[in-house]
Amino acid sequence: MAEMKRTLGLASAAAIVIGSMVGSGIFLVTPKSAVLMGNPGWLILLWVITGIVTILGATSYGKLAAYMPEAGGQYVFLRRAWGNIPAFLYGWVFFWVIQTGFIAAVAVAFSRYLGVLLPAISTETLFMLPMGIPFNTEKLIAVVTLLSLTWFNTRGAEAGALLQNIFTSLKVLALIALIAIGLSMGQELGHISWALTPLPDEIASAGLLSAIAVAAVGPLFSSDAWNYVTFIGGEVKNPSQTLPKALVLGASTVVCLYVLVNLAYLNVLPLDVIKSVPDDKVAAAMMTTLFGSLGGKLIAAIILVSTFGCLNGMILSGARVFYAMAQDGLLFKPFAALHPTTQSPNISLWAQCAWGIVLALSGNYGLLLDYIIFTALVFYIVTMAGLLKLARHNNGELAPRLNMHTLWDYAPPVLYIIAASILSAYMLLSASTQTTSVIGVAITLTGLPVYWLWQQYRPASA
């Protein structure tokens, strides 16, 4: 029987963290946060706060990954700490929305920015699919990209990691170039007052924490997927050392780059311009201001590299969750099959690809992701709580194996739980995010009757 082999080192693991985190979000989300914060000082502070929360999460997951370095990552952590039901619900919503919705969104973003360089790729309808869904060349390229990267990753983790290393290196260099251009060619930072002035009237009435919580959705969304390297934990060499280092190194690198990118935006564009850029394309606005139409094409090329690398990392890692679920009898047994030569979970990869294509063609992935942001944050909180539970298990017997020796070791998960709980509470209470949050919870809970039916009528193939 084929088994996964530990072939990936620190560089590849860190590349998966960075590559999965950096997609198209950093080039688009700043304008909405700027509108809510209304001040350059608050805007940069927001990115620092969300960055700290991200690093706290990565540090905590590093402890879990070192203790349970298995394929499946967060799913495995939830199952060990809380049992089958929370783990199944996570896997359920991960397959139908989180993972496949993300890869659909990133594939369409890649296709859309390729259309900037190749005008033949457009949203002009070629013909209608069933249920009145329009088909166009933009969707065609998204589908071809998903199929191609899935096929490439069926060649094994080493092949996927090699591609990831290349594109992560390119996207980091591209972000550094973007930062250097913005900070060296702009002149706005010298005229900015960094005083934390009162928030806009329409936001101030809801309170500071509420404003930060709502404004943080975009930055947190653009910084998400830092946990994806844990999904491929069964193929990392010396995982107890490598995974924690990769998580912290990768997340910290991205956080620093994101703060610097936002400073670059502010150095070229006045805040009022950032607030009102068309379609939230702030990076394109910055480059167009400096280089004209050539700038727009340059940023399109940077986003192409970024989204392609992000998509590869997510496809490579995400399928391991379904492989782990099938191994535990919570999904059809063929999902746990490994290719005898490449040791890759090919059926899980192709199933992930198939539903991702359905979402990309339907165009509903954006709405689904809006629904699930709150639920994804709750799963992070529950996972962190699971770390604390495991560390206290049997009067602390597991604490040394989790590297939980002192109060300082407990600080990252505790601080993350506090910060994420505040953010999620305000997301649930805020009028602008309340409906989507409730719907997200409802989507997740649809997995409960499915789990019950699965336990009652589990097929022989499970």
Image (cartoon, rainbow, N blue to C red):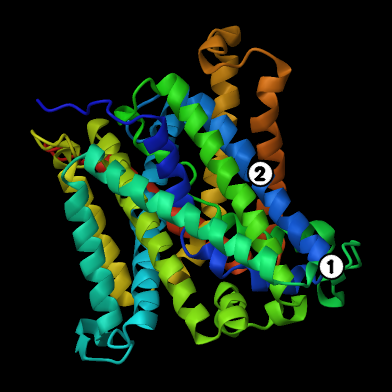
Res 33 visible: no
Q: Residue at x 43, y 60 (%)?
A: 306
Q: Position of residue 418 (x, y in %)?
A: 71, 40
Residue 59: give x, y in percent of width and height: 58, 32
Disc ID at residue 53:
2
Task: Identify the residue at the far front of this view.
Answer: 184
Q: Secondary structure at mark 1?
A: helix
Q: Circle 2: is it few (<14), some (14-19), or many (20+) Cα within 10 Å?
A: many
Figure check: 398 above or below 222: above
> Label 1 is placed on what type of residue?
Gly
- Tell me the tag on residue 355: none
Do labels 2 and 1 touch, CB within 8 Å? no
Name the element at disc 2. Answer: helix
- When the figure is inspected, residue 175 is found, relative to residue 328, above or below; the finding is below
Task: Report which residue position mark 1 lands on.
Answer: 190
**Left or right: where does residue 374 sit relative to residue 34?**
left
Q: Identify whether 129 is placed above or below 37.
A: below
Amino acid under label 2? Val
Between 396 and 311, which is closer to the camera in this rendering?
311
Which callout, 2 or 1, points at the residue further toward the start of the chain? 2
42 sits to left or right of 50: right
Q: Nearer the viewer, mark 2 or mark 1?
A: 1
